[in-house]
Each structure stands twice: as structure tokens, then as C-alpha cells.
């Protein structure tokens, strides 16, 4: 049984390559998908969103791992590219790296610097028409980024703490909820923590401990993989609702272009030079319709259809 006023959600990344989305609806109310690891785009982010929407989920968010050793501006730019065209409204900044590599090797950043970098990231999110939020651990904040305590609760907060011994367990969803799932919302706070200043809105309580049906590490679904489990407050879950809009009616192409690139041109899912390749190619001397044009990433792009964009540099308008 899930505790009152909270919903059970999974946070998912590239490591969970495939899910039985419809089957999971019996147990799971929503998802938090990884969008970035620093400036590295999680290649399953858009696929996960699409599959979740196709299965009828309407509560989802994104999270990004803040790399203090990489440019915050560059990380925000990559996030804008990942979010482009998605319905995501809430983005969590995952703050848990104190060293100058993701392995947390020396030298460490100062607590003040870590707080400032987090503030820069969260402030940048406010320009993207999404709700900024923070993921961390109270023990980590206390040890490495104490100034965060002064302002982090201005935002929705997702805390991690795991009340289980180490070691993985394969079990059913029924067993998980009956035996292991916490019966009270109680993420760990430090003894001195000022709870009047704010409390968590979500709690990651499992770590990578539980291997459950419906979650796999490959698209063939031959091997199950652990997953993080979370309680999310009804209030935060409501903020994560994506809503649905009616599809735009088909409109005639307003321009026709001709490709003169000898090797053809790649068609991408988004109008960015490192957008996901659709494997579709515009061939040399092939004409193609353009329904919309945007300037992005230093190029003019033409929209060929939903999720299909091509840079127009190596082509010319013929009508």
C-alpha cells in the first residue's frame, strides 16, 4: 500500500533501456527521467517520454546531474535542447558532486562555490518556463554544501535516503509494497535540520536495491535491472502533470527546397546540430517541403514534419 497523500514514481535513465509501460501502470503513477549528465544528453530521454505518454501517463519530470567541473551555461544550453518540444514542466537539479570529476576526486569545490553553482543552474531554469527543483541528500549538503540550506527550500525538494541494508533483492511489486515500502514519509534529515524552514516534497527511498518486474536493461527485455523508487507528494505530482493538447491540423508546405549536398543531409528530431538522428536522409537533388523555419544552433532549420528537422545550409529554395 502506498502511504496517503503521496504517489509512487520511478526515476529512469539510459540504464533502464526498456520498460513494460502499460504493465507498470498498476503500480507506478509517474516518472522522473534523466535529461543530462553535465552536458551529456541521455539518449533515452525522449524515447522514455514518448513511451510514457503513449501508455497514458500524465505525471512526469526531468532531472539533470549538475557537473561543477563543466560550464553551467553549456549545461543549460544542452538542457534547452533536450527539453525542446517536450511537455516537461518540472526539472530537478541533482546536486551531489563535490569534486572536480564525477568520481568526486580531489580537489573539492568549496561549500560556497557549490551553493553558488547550484544557484546559477536553478536561476537559469527560471528562464525556460519550467518549475525548478532540487535533488540532493541532507548528509551531503551538511558535509559539502551547507550554504544550500539557506535557500534550497524555496524550491521543490527531492531528498535521497535509504533505510535498507546493502544488497539487491529481486521480488514482486506485491512483495515490495507489503514488506519493504516505507509506511510513513520520512526522508532522513540531520539532527540540527531546521524543519520549519522547509521539508522534502519527494523522497527517493530505495537506491538501486530492488529488481522488479517490468524494468529491463536491454530492449530485448531479457535482463531485469534495479530501479530507484520514490514517494512524491500529491502537490508536486500535480505540478508534474503535463496535460494533453489536440494535435495541430495539417497545413500545406509554405516553401519547397532542393538539396545540393553531394552526400545528402541528415534529418534530426530537433533543430540542433547534435539532435537525435532519425536515420532519414535528404538525398542529393531531392526536393522537400518545409512547413516551418527556425534559426537555432547557428543554422536555419526547416521542419519536414513532427520530429523531423533538417539544416538548410546545403539546399536552396525553389518555390
Image (cartoon, rainbow, N blue to C red):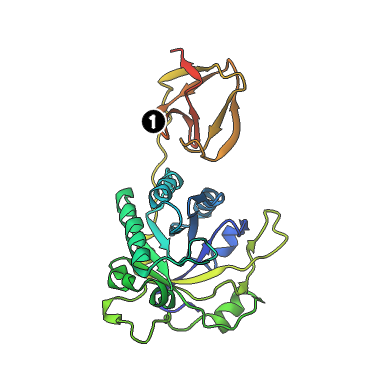
Q: Is residue 191 above or below residue 249?
A: below
Q: Nearer the viewer, residue 52 or 296?
A: 296
Q: Position of residue 87 (x, y in %)?
A: 41, 49
Q: How many marks?
A: 1
240 up-or-down from 318: above or below:
below
Q: Position of residue 291 (x, y in %)?
A: 43, 26
User: Residue lying farthest bottom?
Assistant: 191
Whether 238 is drawn above or below 3: the answer is: above
Quadrant of image for the C terminus:
top left
Q: Which residue sits at x=50%, y=29%? A: 310
Q: Indicate the secondary structure of the residue bearing disc 1.
A: strand
Q: Is residue 198 left or right of residue 308?
A: left
Q: Residue at x 50, y 57 (%)?
A: 34
Q: Of residues 286 and 212, which is closer to you in this image?
A: 286
Give the residue at the far front of this rendering: 107
Residue name at image x 30 percent, y 49 percent = 127
With 210 as the anchor, is 110 left or right in this view?
left
Q: Residues within 10 Å of mark 1 (few under 14, many from 20)?
A: few
Expressed as whole percent of the image width and height from the top left, the position of residue 179 reads 57, 84
Q: Quadrant of residue 108?
A: bottom left
Residue furthest right as drawn: 222
Q: Residue 15 in the image: x percent, y percent? A: 61, 59
Asked which quadrant contains residue 192, the reply is bottom left
Residue matched to label 1: 294
Q: Nearer the viewer, residue 284 or 2?
A: 284
Amino acid at each position: 500500500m502506498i502511504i496517503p497523500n503521496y504517489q509512487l514514481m520511478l526515476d529512469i535513465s539510459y540504464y533502464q533501456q526498456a520498460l513494460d509501460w502499460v504493465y507498470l501502470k498498476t503500480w507506478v503513477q509517474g516518472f522522473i527521467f534523466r535529461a543530462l549528465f553535465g552536458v551529456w544528453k541521455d539518449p533515452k530521454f525522449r524515447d522514455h517520454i514518448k513511451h510514457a505518454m503513449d501508455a497514458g501517463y500524465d505525471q512526469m519530470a526531468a532531472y539533470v546531474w549538475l557537473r561543477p567541473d563543466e560550464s553551467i551555461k553549456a549545461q543549460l544550453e544542452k538542457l534547452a535542447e533536450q527539453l525542446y518540444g517536450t511537455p516537461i514542466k518540472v526539472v530537478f537539479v541533482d546536486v551531489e558532486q563535490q569534486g572536480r570529476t564525477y568520481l568526486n576526486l580531489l580537489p573539492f569545490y568549496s561549500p560556497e562555490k557549490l551553493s553558488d553553482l547550484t544557484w546559477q543552474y536553478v536561476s537559469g531554469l527560471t528562464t525556460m518556463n519550467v518549475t525548478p527543483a532540487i535533488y540532493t541528500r541532507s548528509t551531503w549538503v551538511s558535509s559539502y554544501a551547507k550554504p544550500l540550506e539557506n535557500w534550497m527550500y524555496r524550491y521543490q525538494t527531492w531528498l535521497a535516503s535509504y533505510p535498507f541494508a546493502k544488497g539487491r533483492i529481486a521480488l514482486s511489486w506485491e512483495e515490495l509494497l507489503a514488506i519493504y515500502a516505507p509506511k510513513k514519509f520520512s526522508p532522513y534529515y540531520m539532527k540540527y535540520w531546521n524543519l520549519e524552514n522547509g521539508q522534502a516534497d519527494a523522497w527517493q527511498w530505495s537506491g538501486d536495491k530492488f529488481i522488479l518486474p517490468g524494468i529491463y536493461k536491454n530492449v530485448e527485455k531479457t535482463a531485469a535491472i534495479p530501479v530507484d523508487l520514490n514517494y512524491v507528494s500529491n502537490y508536486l505530482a500535480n505540478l508534474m502533470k503535463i496535460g494533453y493538447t489536440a494535435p495541430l491540423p495539417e497545413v500545406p508546405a509554405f516553401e519547397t527546397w532542393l538539396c545540393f549536398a553531394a552526400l545528402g543531409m541528415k534529418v534530426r528530431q530537433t533543430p540542433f546540430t547534435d539532435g537525435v538522428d532519425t536515420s532519414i536522409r535528404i538525398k542529393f537533388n531531392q526536393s522537400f517541403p518545409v512547413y516551418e523555419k527556425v534559426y537555432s544552433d547557428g543554422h536555419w532549420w526547416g521542419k519536414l514534419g513532427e520530429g523531423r528537422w533538417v539544416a538548410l545550409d546545403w539546399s536552396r529554395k525553389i518555390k
